[in-house]
Image: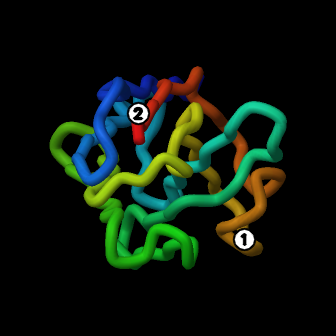
Amino acid sequence: QVQLVESGGGLVQAGGSLRLSCAASGRTFSNYAMGWFRQAPGKEREFVAAIRWSTSSTFYADSVKGRFTISRDNAKNTVYLQMNSLKFDDTAVYYCACRHGSGSYSFPSNYDYWGQGTQVTVSS
């Protein structure tokens, strides 16, 4: 059974930084892609970033390009989301997800497994 456990959320002032972690377990992820999504109150879940585990190819939403960096540590089976220059609009619950199939990385429906989420709050 695949398990994804996020950590690293918290309260930060605008302009600050946070690093989220997603520890993955339950299988070999070499043929998977990992993604980060976020959901603010009253809004739909939106794509943030994704990484292909085997090639480390990365993909970002336009709203976070240049500010967020997704990476992975093979030895720890962990994916990270480094978030810099945080803005009030980045406030949301952030979810880690993984997928084995094809299709756009930005659609939540293309992901097979999800973590429980971690809250990120940016104060203005």
Q: Nearer the viewer, residue 3 or 80?
A: 80
Quadrant containing the C terminus is top left
Residue 24 numbered tag? 2
* Residue at the (70%, 54%) spot, across then down: 46
Is residue 3 depicted above or below 37 in this figure? Answer: above
Is residue 5 depicted above or below 37 in this figure? Answer: above
**Could you say where residue 59 lies in the image, as x and y percent from the top left?**
49, 75
**Could you say where residue 3 lies in the image, as x and y percent from the top left?**
51, 24
Residue 95 visible in this rendered orientation of the protein: no
Q: Nearer the viewer, residue 111 or 25?
A: 111
Verify CB contact (< 8 Å) between mark 2 and mark 1.
Answer: no
Quadrant containing the N terminus is top right
Is residue 32 depicted above or below 120 in this figure? Answer: below
SS for callout 1: loop
SS for callout 2: strand
Image-based side of 91 in relation to 55, left or right? right
* Residue at the (50%, 73%) spot, across then down: 60
Image-based side of 51 in relation to 112, left or right? left
Residue corresponding to mark 1:
102
Question: Mark 2 to mark 1: distance in Å?
Answer: 20 Å
**Could you say where residue 21 lies in the image, as x and y percent from the top left?**
31, 36
- Graded by Cα atoms within 10 Å as few (under 14), some (14 to 19) or many (20 or more), the crowding at tag 1 reads few
Q: How is the image coloured?
A: rainbow
**Could you say where residue 4 lies in the image, as x and y percent from the top left?**
49, 28
* Residue at the (73%, 74%) spot, across then down: 104
Is residue 1 depicted above or below 90 in this figure? Answer: above
Image-based side of 112 in relation to 44, left or right? left
Image-based side of 65 in relation to 20, left or right? right
Lower sequence index among marks 2 and 1: 2
Question: What amino acid is labelled 1 in the image?
Answer: Ser
Residue 88 visible in this rendered orientation of the protein: yes
* Residue at the (72%, 71%) spot, across then down: 102
